[in-house]
Amino acid sequence: MSGPLDGIRVIEVASWMFIPSGGSVLIDWGAEVLKIEHPETGDPQRGLMTSGIMPGGAAAINFMIEQPNRGKKSIAIDITHADGHEALMKLVETADVFLTNYLPPIRRKLKIDTDDVRARNPNIIIARGSGQGPKGPDAEKGGFDGAAFWARGGVGMTVPQGKDGWPSGQPTPAFGDVMGGMATAGGIAAALVKRERTGEPSIVDVSLLATALWQISPMVLMNKLYGMERLTSGERGVPGNPGVGNYRTKDGRFVAMMLLQGDRFWADWVTRLGKPELVDDPRFADAAARAENAAECQKILDEAYENFTLDELKVAFEGFDGVWSPFQTLAELYEDPQVIANGYLPTADINGTPFQMVASPAQFDETAVEVERAPEHGEHTEMQLLEVGYDWDQLIAMKESGAIL
């Protein structure tokens, strides 16, 4: 099955997670992505294993390289070398998209800024990722998601505070990066459609700061209207609608109930919980009554849930029309029948080891994403340069000079 971006070639001059994760989405959509890496250092994330941050050894898998770079082709070029720069530009001439997260001063120094790239390929789409955006006093400053997204973007201050009032940390590594990568891929896809229709190539900019604002946009607007600064504390309160909230089972597991139409589900819900007498209880006869007696209602429901283990609750709620879900552990995601049926955790072969990675969310034509391993450092250098006109004698000379790996 072909992907919607089959035949699209992307040159990625980027590192870490933010923009490379956008490149991995483009891979899932069918594009070819050439990852440009320095011959000696490569993407800094390759060093996480050798630096001891991740376990090493023959069977070790650097998942922070695999997830955002799966399926790409690695071209090891020293852009600071004249021959290396020319090799990059020959690749640029064959591409549809130039994707980068290098800061403006670095782009200018390396002569890979917009004017430089467009001079060799006037029709190429330029996609740039940044911490704070392309304009303003901090446009040329760096930004990782822990600072530009979580801290400056306000996300960390909208969630409940940690101990002693400290801001909570991000719930997962690269939390803002992967969302920014999705936005970047979507922007590139829209730019490709525009170029197809009008012939005009775009410059696409996505920042971690803008991604944060979009992610918490309801809270940003609520602050302006009502002065709200953060979500309520992590402590469980009494909901006006007992059908919307979290409950604990006998075996210490938690479930989320999202019964927004309380009256519609009330009778079936409480009957399945072994409390049919609540159906006609005047204290809980309708949404208004349940809201008025919310604390008492919640207490009775808490006691009902604590009569079930999670497995027993799943049996009791089989066929229930209301929306609910257990709080799953990360390990349980691998066994979730919906995750399996839809292929959300496809498997790649990495040096003989089957390894599951996360597919980007969009599927096309009801076809699950297939993934391949991330490339070895510089794995595709020779073959890609041969395709754009170099011969083996030239490649050997460039290797000896350090222009390529």
Image (cartoon, rainbow, N blue to C red):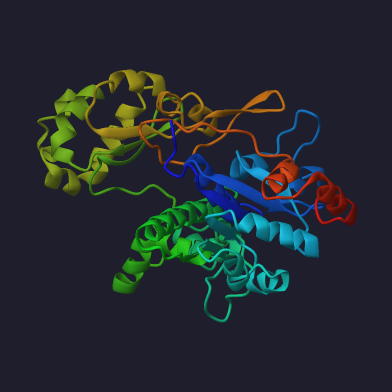
The N terminus, quarter of image: top left
The location of residue 135, given as percent across then percent down, is 52, 77
Q: Nearer the viewer, residue 18 or 70?
A: 70
In the visual, does 75 lie left or right of 229? Answer: right
Q: Where, by quadrant of the figure, is residue 131 drawn?
A: bottom right
Q: Is residue 37 above or below residue 219?
A: above
For this orientation, the residue located farthest to the bottom is: 137
The location of residue 365, given as percent across then percent down, is 35, 33
The location of residue 124, given as percent across then percent down, is 52, 61
Q: Nearer the viewer, residue 125 or 334?
A: 125
Task: Write the residue at 47% across / 51% down.
Answer: 182
Q: Is residue 355 above or below residue 24?
A: above
Can see residue 18?
no
Q: Nearer the viewer, residue 103 or 365?
A: 365
The location of residue 17, given as percent across then percent down, is 61, 52
In the visual, does 49 lie left or right of 306? Answer: right
Q: Where, by quadrant of the figure, is residue 11 drawn?
A: bottom right
Q: How many marks?
A: 0
Q: Is residue 14 above or below residue 297?
A: below
Task: Write the residue at 30% across / 71% down.
Answer: 226
Q: Is residue 209 above or below residue 361?
A: below
Can see residue 289?
yes
In the visual, does 360 lie left or right of 198? Answer: right
Q: Nearer the viewer, residue 403 or 189?
A: 403
